[in-house]
Every structure is written in C-alpha cells, then in structure tokens.
Image (cartoon, rainbow, N blue to C red):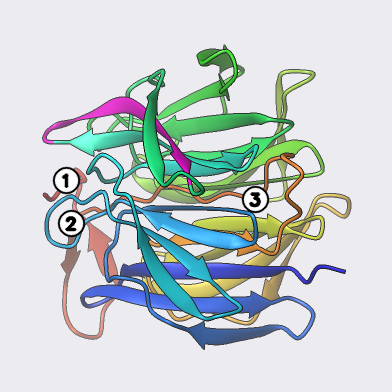
Amino acid sequence: MLQYYGFTSCGFNNGRKGTTEKFDDTANTQTPRTDATPRNRLAGYSFNSYGFTTCGTTGSATGLTERFDDTANTQTGRLAATARTYLAGYSFNNYGFSTCVYIGVSGTGTTERFDDTANTQTGRLAATARYQLAGYAFNNYGFSTCGTTNGSNAFGTTERFDDTANTQTGRTVATARYGLAGYAFNNYGFSTCGYIPNNVTGTTERFDDTANTQTGRTAATARDYLTGYAFTNYGFSSCGETPLTTGLTERFDDTANSHTTRAAATARYELAGYSTNLPSSGRGGPTKLSISIVRRHRVSKNTKMMNISKRFITG
C-alpha cells in the first residue's frame, strides 16, 4: 500500500530558499528534507514516486530541473528546461510538463515535456501566452488556468493540453486572477486563491472537463503566491502571502466543501509543491502551480506589507 505525502520546495522569504518539507496529513506534521537548489518563481510536478522542481530564478532565469527522491532524501540534477520564470507545471502519463513563462517584458506559452527515463526536454505546442498561472492534470490531460500578461491585468483563460494530439484547447474560463495555486483529484481540477487586481482572494473553483464548467466552492484563506498539491482525495494549499508571508496549510474536502487548517509549513512564497508515492497509472497526479513575484513595499519593520498600487515585475 502506497503512502502519500505532500511536499513544498524552494521559495522566497528574506532571500531565496531551497527549503523542502514533507507534509504528512495523517500525523499532521511538516518534516524537513534535503534542500533543493535555492530559487523562487519555479514550478513543480511529480510522477513515478519522484518529485521534480523546474525553472525559476536564482538571480537570473534558469531551467534547472531537479528530481527529489524521498526514500533516499536526495536532490538530483536532470536536464534543464528552457530557462524561464512564473510558469506552471503538471504531470500525466509518466511525463512532467512545464508551461507558459515570463521572459523579459511579457509572457509566452512555451510548453515542454520532461522524460525522466530518457532525461530529455521536448518542445510541445505552446499554450496561450501568460504567466503567474496555475496548472493541474487529470484524465490524461494537462490544464493551465488563469494568469496575467503584464503583471496588472488578470485572466481566467483555461486550456486543456492533449500530449498525444499535441493540441491546446480552450475551456470555460475560471474567475480571472493570477498568483494562484492548482491541484486535481477525483477527476476534477481546482484553482484556489490568487490576486484579483487590488485584492488578495481565497476564491476556489472546481473545473469539470466533461461538463466544461467552473463551479464556485468554499473560499480558502485569502493569499497569493502560494502552492498546491493533492492526495488521498483532498486538495492542499500551502504558504503564500496574506500579504504577510505565511506557512498556512489548508486541506480542502470537496465532498464537505470545507477548508481545514493543518500544520503550517515554513513561511515562504513563490514556491513549488507536489505529492509523491503516486501510482504510475498515467492518470495524472497532483500538480504544482506556478508562482510569481511582485515588488513589495514594507512601510516599517512592524507594519504589514502594502502592495504597490501597480504590481511591478522584477527581473
């Protein structure tokens, strides 16, 4: 019988972090694991009982891809993806995918498939150009949702990626926001939290690909630049900014339509998440979101952070 865990990795909190922690929902514990290479604005995914972190920034954009083995507690470098930040990740059919990106002054839809066995990165059909979006996968498809094209507007664009056909297909839009998280379980995809211009939100929506519908669910605690993962029929959102940097972790039960607070992770934002020890059935496991960065202004040491009225992108 497989044991399922959620993981958070890397991020930013007074500097870039490689912090990697394992969340055990049964014991309600967060356990430190071997650090990844410190970076933020990255993506994560998992398959074949490994977790992967990809891309982000170490001070400049990188395509660094690392494989985390929880049994050995090791981080192993793999072939780099195209260097980029603010992207999303998902996995299905024993491949990992990274999609969309911030390059220079705008977003692109660059999509790549990672084959861990061959250790290759293969270009696939681009998604609609945007960044600071979320990703998830189920039923042998990957999905990208929401995002921004300039750091101040927001979109609910949702697209389904079919790797066999190498196509991107528009689906019903979600509530427009960016800096959000995504996860999938029970053949639904979920988007949660994020930033609607001038407002941090806990908006949580369930996407049904068969019906092509987005359905509002109970809101999570409002925050942005968080991460998400899913296992054992629950979705989890972790960390982010409220706007204070937090390690808040919540479990979403879709049947009860409720969010329950769990043990907090180390506080950080612009991080990656994934869950491991997934069955290698090609059903498309829980995924991570892509996360973004905004320049913040701290009014004083003891006051809350304020968002600059326009969320300027840093390099």
Which residue lies at the image location 29% right of the left edge and 36% below the top edge? 101
| Label placed on residue 295 | 2
Magenta: main secondary structure: strand
Nearest the viewer among 11 and 44 is 44
Which residue lies at the image location 18% right of the left edge and 62% below the top edge? 58
| Label placed on residue 136 | none
| Label placed on residue 286 | 3
Locate residue 197 relative to residue 21 in the image: left or right. left
Say what secondary structure mark 3 lies in.
Answer: loop
Q: Nearer the viewer, mark 3 or mark 1?
A: 3
Which residue lies at the image location 76% right of the left edge and 86% below the top edge? 27
Query: Mark 1 or mark 2: which comes first in sequence?
Result: 2
Q: CA distance from mark 3 to mark 1?
A: 28 Å
Query: Mark 2 or mark 3: which comes first in sequence?
Result: 3
Residue underneath mark 1: 313
Looking at the rendered structure, the kind of residue marked 2 is Arg
